[in-house]
């Protein structure tokens, strides 16, 4: 690198840290998380602090920002120990965005977005019919990382069942061209997954 280096001390501003993290770590996959509350209300919200962390058992993780009271997703996951991660393709990206509004309790993001809840096989949380991939999950652990402003909690879940649209799968390989997943960049930007290239790993 020939250009000047900017050095940032993360102890100065949580807002700056957030801005840097969401700009540095790109693109981020999006967990579109459906849950059910202890009194049976469905909830649906996107989280881009999301990834796979283990294959055996299959574990995935997402993080919710700290709020008092907590975000509905975290409250529901704590209360029921279950959730579903739905993958966001281009065709439902705008509906996913509608679900990210911080609506008052009692407002259903399924109704707001027009997305369809369907029963899961193993958990009470519903799946999103329009998602080409749903992962039914049971909570393994919730780590409350920080209760400072802009702190958060990390939810780790075990995938109990995958639901895959057969049209996008060959030999259990998911065709990214057909999945057309979207990723989140910084601010309000998103990316498509249409521009890909291959590299073969060195055989050592
Ligand atoms: C693409 C996208 C990604 C998001 N990622 C996160 C995230 O990783 N963590 C978080 O706390 N909020 C995230 N949000 C904001 C939540 O979706 C928003 O706070 C939502 O209202 C939470 O809903 P809930 O209270 O029903 O759980 C994201 C929003 C969008 C649009």
Image (spheres, grey):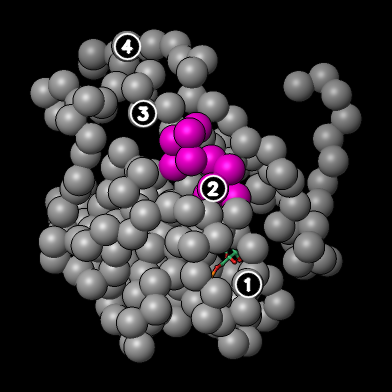
Question: Badge 3 is on which residue?
Answer: 179
Q: Position of residue 128 (x, y in %)?
A: 34, 53
In this picture, residue 54 sits left or right of residue 87: left
Could you classify mark 2 by the number of other residues whose Cα lies within 10 Å: few (under 14), some (14-19), or many (20 or more)?
A: some
Residue 47 visible in rendering: no
Question: Badge 2 is on which residue?
Answer: 95
Real-space CA distance between mark 4 and mark 2, rounded to the nearest whole angstrom: 36 Å
Q: Looking at the image, is mark 3 or mark 2 nearer the viewer?
A: 2
Question: Badge 1 is on which residue?
Answer: 103
Q: Are marks 4 and 2 in contact (CB under 8 Å)?
A: no
**Where, quadrant-wise, is the N terminus in this rendering?**
top right
Real-space CA distance between mark 2 and mark 1, rounded to the nearest whole angstrom: 15 Å
Real-space CA distance between mark 1 and mark 3, rounded to the nearest whole angstrom: 29 Å
Instruction: Indicate which disc, 4 or 2, sits on the residue closer to the N terminus.
Output: 2
* Closer to the camera in the image, 113 or 100: 113
Q: Looking at the image, is mark 4 or mark 2 nearer the viewer?
A: 2
**Where, quadrant-wise, is the C terminus in this rendering?**
top left
In this picture, residue 171 sits left or right of residue 133: left
Instruction: Indicate which disc, 3 or 2, sits on the residue closer to the N terminus.
Output: 2
Does the residue tagged 1 have its C-beta within 8 Å of any atom of ligand 1? yes
Question: Badge 4 is on which residue?
Answer: 200
């Amino acid at each position: 690198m020939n250009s000047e280096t900017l050095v940032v001390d993360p102890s100065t501003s949580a807002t700056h840290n957030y801005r840097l993290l969401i700009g540095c770590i790109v693109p981020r996959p999006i967990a579109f998380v459906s849950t059910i509350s202890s009194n049976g209300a469905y909830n649906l919200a996107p989280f881009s602090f999301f990834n796979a962390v283990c294959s055996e058992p299959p574990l995935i993780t997402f993080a919710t920002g700290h709020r008092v009271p907590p975000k509905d997703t975290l409250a529901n996951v704590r209360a029921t120990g279950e959730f579903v991660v739905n993958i966001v393709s281009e065709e439902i990206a705008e509906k996913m965005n509608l679900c990210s509004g911080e609506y008052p309790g009692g407002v259903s993001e399924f109704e707001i977005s027009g997305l369809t809840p369907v029963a899961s096989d193993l958990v009470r949380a519903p799946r999103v019919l329009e998602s080409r991939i749903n992962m039914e999950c049971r909570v393994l652990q919730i780590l409350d990382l920080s209760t400072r402003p802009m702190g958060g909690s990390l939810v780790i879940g075990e995938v109990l069942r995958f639901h895959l649209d057969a049209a996008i799968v060959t030999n259990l390989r998911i065709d990214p061209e057909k999945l057309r997943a979207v990723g989140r960049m910084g601010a309000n930007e998103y990316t498509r997954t249409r521009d890909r290239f291959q590299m073969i790993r060195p055989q050592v």
